[in-house]
Image (cartoon, rainbow, N blue to C red):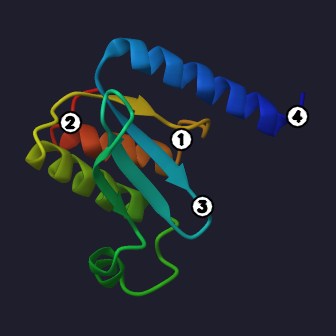
């Protein structure tokens, strides 16, 4: 089994475990240039809040294009997604890292979201 197949299998198992908890899901995706975060409803049918370094407001605060792939940008996105989720009435989420290792940008985003008041 390839590493990609293993990662997909683990993320599928994680989503099944999260679905039994009955809470909204904070999912993270990262690329070399950007990091994306979304809060998805507990039944998985709609996106409640989203934030990414591809947004125009975030890009200007980071100082232009090409600066969204670092931990400082992930911290901004973590705070931003927590604010948007709390504004939508979501206080508690389950963290879905989508198979990405919990270090670097993923950890920075999670820590910033926790500091901004999101519980997971």
Name the residue tied to disc 1. 103
Q: Mark 2 or 3 closer to N-term? A: 3
Residue at horizontal 40 percent and vertical 31 percent from the top:
95
Are dots 4 and 1 in contact, CB under 8 Å? Answer: no
Q: Secondary structure at mark 4?
A: loop
Residue at horizontal 40 percent and vertical 57 percent from the top:
74
Residue at horizontal 51 percent and vertical 66 percent from the top:
34
Are dots 2 and 1 in contact, CB under 8 Å? Answer: no
Name the foreground residue: 27 vs 78.
27
Judged left or right of residue 44, residue 6 is right
Name the residue tied to disc 4. 2
Question: Alpha carbon of mark 3 to alpha carbon of mark 4: how far?
Answer: 20 Å
Image quarter where the C terminus lies is: top left
Name the foreground residue: 3 vs 15.
15
Image quarter where the N terminus lies is: top right
Mark 1 is surrounded, within 10 Å at the Cα level, by few (under 14), some (14 to 19) or many (20 or more) other residues, namely: few
Which one is in front in this view, the residue at disc 4 or the one at disc 2?
4
């Amino acid at each position: 089994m390839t590493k990609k197949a293993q990662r997909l299998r683990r993320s599928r198992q994680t989503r099944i475990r999260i679905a039994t908890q009955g809470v909204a899901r904070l999912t993270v995706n990262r690329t070399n240039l950007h990091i994306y975060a979304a809060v998805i409803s507990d039944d998985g049918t709609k996106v409640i809040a989203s934030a990414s370094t591809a947004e125009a407001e975030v890009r200007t605060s980071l100082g232009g294009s090409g600066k969204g792939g670092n931990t400082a940008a992930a911290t901004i996105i973590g705070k931003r997604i927590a604010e948007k989720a709390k504004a939508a009435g979501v206080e508690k989420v389950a963290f879905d890292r989508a198979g990405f290792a919990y270090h670097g940008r993923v950890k920075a985003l999670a820590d910033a979201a926790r500091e901004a008041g999101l519980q997971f």
